[in-house]
Amino acid sequence: MRHRLTCLLLACISALGSPVRADDDTPASRPNLVVAGGVSLGAYQAGMVYFFNEQHLGERRPGYQVAVGTSAGAVNAAIGAFAACAERQPKPEQSVHYRVWVPLGIDGEPSLFSPKAVTARSILAPAAVDAATKRFVEWIEEPHQWQSCSTALGVTATRLSPRRVPIPLPDGGVPTAQVVRQSERFLIEIRTGPGRSPSVYPYRAPAPLTDFYPHLGRGELDEPLTLEALIDGVVASGAFPVAFPPRNVVERITGPDGTLGPARTVRYVDGGVYANVPLSLAVQLQRWRDPRPADVLLVHPELTPLVPEWGESPTPTSSLGRMLQRFFGDFVQTSLLEGMVEGIVDQPELRQPDGAHLFIPPRRTVTASEHLGAFAGFFDASFRAFDFYLGMLDARASIVARGGTPPRVDSATFDCFVAWDDASSGFTKPVERMPSACIGAPEDMRNLLRASSSYRRWLVAQPDEPPSDAKSDKWFALLDDVGAQPSGAELRESIRRLLGEAVERMAAAQPSMLEGASISILGPIALNSLRYEEPEAIAALGGFWDRGAEVAVGLRPGLSWLRFDLGLRGSAIGTSYLHPRLPERRGWMASAFAHVVWLPSSGPWFQVEPYIGAGIAAPLRGFLGRPVAFRTSIDAGLHWVALQRIYLTTGASTYVHDHFVDGYRPEANALTDAPLRLDLALGVRLFL
C-alpha cells in the first residue's frame, strides 16, 4: 500500500516537473530500451539486446534515447546503452554482451559459488559478479569508434531500510507530509563522441522531484561520475536477496534547497522487489528529455507465454486455502508488472497503431535457464550460451515478422540456430535430420536444441500449466534423452550437492541457534523440491495419544526405497487395547520394535510410508523385580509425513505369543488378554 501511495504521489507531482508536450506527436527517431529482471535469463536478454543493437547500428541509428533496467536487466540496459554508441561487432562471441554473461556462473572463473564466501545473509560469491563487471569496464576503456550519443540510463534498486521524503509543494511552502521510499531509481547520463572516451554524469530530475532520486557517488552535481559509482548502482539492482549479499552504494540526497547532502553508504538489494518491469521510469525519462513519444523495446521473455490458453479458463477453486494461494500468487505477479502498467497508462500512445510502439519480442521456445526459479543458467555455461543465441534468434524472428531485414552476424553456431528454426518451423515440429549448418556447431548446442524443441512440444500438449517441479523434471529427463553432457541426472545431483553445502554453511553462520536450526530444517525441504531424496538416517521423537512416548532411529541400507527403524516406546496399558473386559488403566508398559519401512517416491512436501515389523512388550513393573509376562507382536501401519519433519503414525500391533517368567500368569493381565493394540503417535524427525 505504501508503494502504491508513493507511486500515486509521484505521478501527480511529476506533472509539475514534466515539460509540456509539443504539438508534434511524431515518434522520436531513437528508441527506448527497457530490460526486466531475469536472474540467469540475463544471458537470453543479452543476446536479444546485442542483436537489436547490431540492427540499429547497421541502420545508422546509434544509441538509445533512454535505457532502463532492473536486476539482471539493469546490467543489460547499461551494456546496451554503451554498446549501442560504439561500432558494430558482427561476431557475437566477441561482443561485450557475451563476454560479460556467458562466463558468469558457478562453473566460471572465478566461480559464482565459493564455500568460504557463504555468509549468514547470502550464498553466492560477489567476486564472480565483480569479475563480470570488470570485463564490462575493461571493454568501455578499450579503444572504440564511439558515435555521438547521449543516453539517459535508469536503474532501480531497493533499500534495505526505507527513507522518508518530504512531499514537495508547488508553491515552495514547507512540506507538511512525508512518504516512505524504499524503491529507488538511479539516474545517469552517458555521453560518447568520436575521438574521446565515454563520460558518465548524474542525470538530474526536474524540480520539485530532485530529492526523490539519489545522486550516485561522492561528487557534485556538475561533476562526472566514476565508473565505479555507476557499477555499484547497477550491481545493487541485481543483488537478489539470499543469493547475493546486499551491495553498499555511496549516495547523496538533494535537499529542499537544491544542494547535495553528505555522502552516505547505503545497503541495497534487488530492484525487482518493487519494480521488475520499469517501463514507467522509461516513460518518465523520455518526457524529461524529449516531449515527443518514442518507440520502446521491452525485453522480458516471460511476458509472452508459449501457451496463452492456459490463462483463459482458470480452474475454479474449491477451498479457501486454494483461493488465497491463487490470489496471493496472482497478486505477486501483477505487482511485479505494476511498473509496466503504469508506463502504458502514462503514455497511451504506446498502444495506438499510428503512434509510438511498445515492441515486446515474443519468446518462441523454452530457455535452458528458466528452470529452478531462473537460476539454472548459473550452473552450466552451455545453458547461458544457448540462451544467448536463443535471444538473438528471437530478436531476428521479431525483426523479420515486422518486415525488417535482420543484420548479418558472423557466427557458425548462430547459423545452426537459424537453420534449426527453419527446419523445425519455429521449434514446433520434430527435426528428423540435423541441418547441415549444424554439423560444425558445438555438440552441447545441438543437444540443447533437440531438448528445447522436445520440451516445447511436450509443454504445448499439456491441457493445463504443469507445476514448476514437473517442468524441471521433464527438462532434466530430456537432457538425459538427448545424451547431454553432463546428463540431466548428473547435473541435478551436482546442483543438489552444492546447494546442500551452501545451506549447511549458511546455517552455521547464523548469529543465533534458533535461526541456524530454522535454516537446517527448511533448507533440506527446499533442496528436495529440486530433487527429492530420503535422508540416509533419521531420529524421531513422538508422543502417543494415550500418555506415551517413543524414540526411534531409521537407517537406509543404500537403497532409496527402503529404511530400517529401531525404537523404544513407553505407554499406559489399557486405553489402546481392543478388549471389552479391560479397565481404562492397568499401569505402564515398555516395548521395543524393529520395522521395515517402504519409501515410495512421493515428493518433498508430503510422504506416506507403509511399515511392517515386530515388537516385544512387557509391563513396566517387571523391571522392578516382579515376575512378568512378555509378549511378542506383529506391527503394521503408516507414517504420514509432512515437510519431511512432522509425522503422524497410525498402526496396529497384534500380539501373537506369550512368554512367562517363573510360571506367573495372572487371570486378567492387560497385556496377555488384549489381542490388538492401536497406535496413534505424533512427532518430529531430525536428519542425522
Image (tube, rainbow, N blue to C red):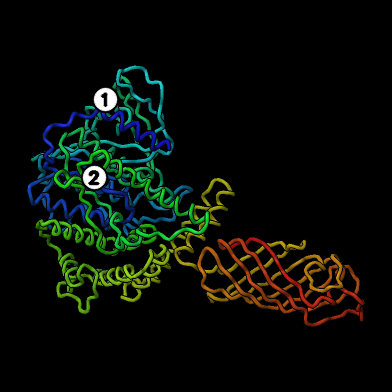
Residue 441 in percent (x, y) is at 19, 70
Could you tell me which residue is drawn at 38 percent across and 50 percent down? Answer: 333
**What's under tag 2, amino acid-wise?**
Ala
Could you tell me which residue is drawn at 33 percent across and 28 percent down? Answer: 253
302 sits to left or right of 52: right
What is the quadrant of residue 639 in the picture?
Answer: bottom right
Depth check, front residue: 453 or 239: 453
What residue did someone put label 1 on?
207
Could you tell me which residue is drawn at 38 percent across and 68 percent down? Answer: 491
Res 662 seen here? yes
- Kind of element beneath mark 2: helix
What residue did someone put label 2 on?
78
**Quadrant where the image shows the N terminus:** top left
Reading the chain from its start, which is encountered first: label 1 or label 2? 2
636 sits to left or right of 5: right
Depth check, front residue: 459 or 641: 459
